[in-house]
Image (cartoon, rainbow, N blue to C red):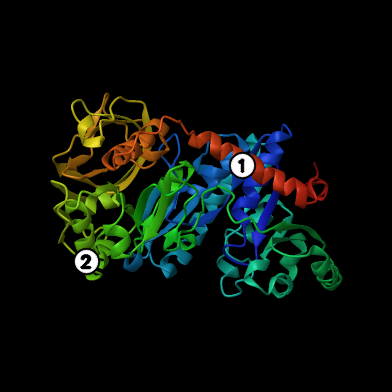
Amino acid sequence: MAKALMIQGTGSGAGKSLVVAGLCRIFRDEGLSVAPFKAQNMALNSCITADGGEIGRAQVLQAQAAGVDPTVDMNPVLLKASGEMGSQVIIQGRPLRHMSAREYYGFRETAWEAVKESYRRLSKTFDVIVMEGAGSPAEINLMDVDIVNMSAAKLARAPVLLVGDIDKGGVFASLYGTVKLLGRDARRIKGYVINKFRGDLDILKPGLDMLEAATGRPVIGVLPYVADLGLPEEDSLSLRNGTMSRGDGTIRVVVVRLRSISNFTDFDPFLCEPDVQLQYSVSPADIENADMVIIPGSKNTVKDLLLLKDAGLDRSIRTAHDRGVKIVAICGGYQMAGRKIHDPHFVESRHNEVDGLGLLDIETTFEETKTTCQVEAKVAQGRAADLAGIGGGGLKGYEIHMGESEGDIGLFEIKRLSGQAPAAGFRPDGSARGHCWGTYIHGIFENDAFRRGVLNGLRQKKGMAPLRTSVSYTEIRERALDRLADLLRLHLDIGFIRRTIGL
C-alpha cells in the first residue's frame, strides 16, 4: 500500500494545488511512483482522461508533474456548478445528474464509496499518494458530510500539512484557528507551510516560534510570493480584467470573461508566445479593438449568452466582427455564436429556445447525454483559407459538451478516441463564416504549429512578417514544474516530509 501525505489549506486559494504538484515532481525525481488524489473537487476547469472520463484540470497538472497519465481515480468526485440547476455531479469521470446542495449531501454515502474505491486502486499501484484537500477542513457546519479533507486523510492514514496564505493577512489566526476548530482531527496536522510571503523572514520568525509554542507543530517552510510561476490557475476567480501578457503585446487577444467561464486554461498557451497580450475582459472597448476575440466555454451557456446580451456585449462582438476582428468560439462559445440554441428537455435552463449571436450558420440542440472524449483532428480539405491558410493534421484536444450542432459544419475533421465507442474514421466538426470560426475542440491552442499559424495570420493582416520561431507549450510547462519543485526544495523541509510519511 502507498505512503500518503495530505495538503490542506486554511481556505480556498491558499496554494494547495501547486504545493501538491511540486511535491509530485520532487517524489518523481527521486525515482518514486507517485500520484495525486483529490477526493472531491468543485471546478469548472476540467479535462478528459484517456478513457473518456472527466476530472479536475488541477489533478491533470499534478499527474503531469508526477510523470503519469491522469485517471479518473485521481479525482473521483467532480462537482460543476450550474447556477439555478445546482451542480452537475460527476462520479469517477462519468456525469450522473444535477443536484442541489441538499440533494448532494444526501448522496454523500454513495460519493464516499466512490472515493474509497478510487483511493484503494491508486494505493495498490503507486509508492506515494499526495492528496489535496478542498477549501478549509474547519468548516464546522460541513464536517459531518466531509469526504475530501479529514475523512479522506483518515481513509489514507495520511499526515497533514496545513498551508496558509500570508498575502491575504491573518495567517497566524487562520492556522491557529483551524487547528483549534478541528478538535481531535487536529492530531493529523503535523506541520504548517506559509505561502506567498514577501518581506524580511527575520521579522516573521518570532511569529513562527510563537505559533509552534501555541500549537505544538512547527512551520516547516515559508514559500516566497512568486508573481508568475508560469503554471495554470485552477479557479476562474484568479482571472481579472486586464493584461496577462508575457509577450510584447503586438497581437491583442481578448477572451470574453463569461460569468460561468469554463476551461479557461485553453488559452494559457498564448502566454508562451513572444508577441501576444492576453486579456480576460468584458469591456466593449477591449473587445472592439482586439486583434482576436475568443468566446470561451461556459458551464451555463444559455445564461451567459443572455448576460452578454443584457450587457450589450453581443453588439460589441458583432461590431468587432464587422471591423474585421477575428472571432474564435470554443465549445459553449461555439454554440453561442450560432443562430439558435434549442433546449427541448430543459437540460441547462428553463428556456426552450434562444437566439444566438448569428455569426455562424449552425444551430445547437442540447441533449441529455454528455460528450466527453479525447480527439485527434485535422483541418478539413479545402478549409485552410478559413484559418489563415493553416492546413494539415496532427491536432489533438478533447471534447466536453452537452448537445450537438447542425448546419454548416465541417471546418475540422475529428476522430473520437475514447468515451463514445465512436464510429471508425473522422467526422465533421466546427464552422466558419466571415471573420468567425468555432469548434468543440478544447485544447486546440496547445498544438504549437496551429497556434502560431493563427497568430501569424493576424500578423499578416496587420502587415507584419510572420514569426518562424516555434514555442513548445509542453516544454515550457515542464520547465515551470521543475522550477516549482526547485522552489519547494529550497524553502520546505523535505527531510521532515519524508520522515513524516515514513519514506
Residue positioned 43% across, 68% down in the render: 101
Q: Secondary structure at mark 1?
A: helix
Q: Is residue 1 visible to us here?
A: no
Q: Is residue 432 visible to us here?
A: yes
Q: Quadrant of residue 152?
A: bottom right
Number of marks in picture: 2
Q: Secondary structure at mark 2?
A: helix
Left or right: 439 in relation to 192: left
Q: Residues within 10 Å of mark 1 (few under 14, many from 20)?
A: many
User: What residue is pinned by disc 1?
Assistant: 481
Which amino acid lies under the numbered mark 2 shown in the image of this protein?
Lys
Residue positioned 26% across, 35% down in the render: 388
Residue positioned 52% across, 43% down in the render: 60
- x and y percent of residue 207 in the render? 81, 71
Label located before the other in sequence (1 or 2): 2
| Quadrant including the C terminus | top right
Left or right: 458 in relation to 56: left
- x and y percent of residue 344 in the render? 16, 57
User: What residue is pinned by disc 2?
Assistant: 309
Q: Quadrant of residue 208?
A: bottom right
- x and y percent of residue 131 in the render? 64, 50
The span from disc 1 to disc 2 (Cα, nearest Å) is 40 Å
Q: Nearer the viewer, residue 14 or 87?
A: 14
Q: Nearer the viewer, residue 491 or 419?
A: 491
Which amino acid lies under the numbered mark 1 shown in the image of this protein?
Leu
Q: Nearer the viewer, residue 170 or 389?
A: 389
Residue positioned 71% across, 52% down in the render: 158
CB-based contact (under 8 Å), mark 1 and mark 2: no
Q: Residues within 10 Å of mark 2 (few under 14, many from 20)?
A: some
Left or right: 338 in relation to 33: left
Q: Where 321 falls versus 448 (above or below)?
A: below
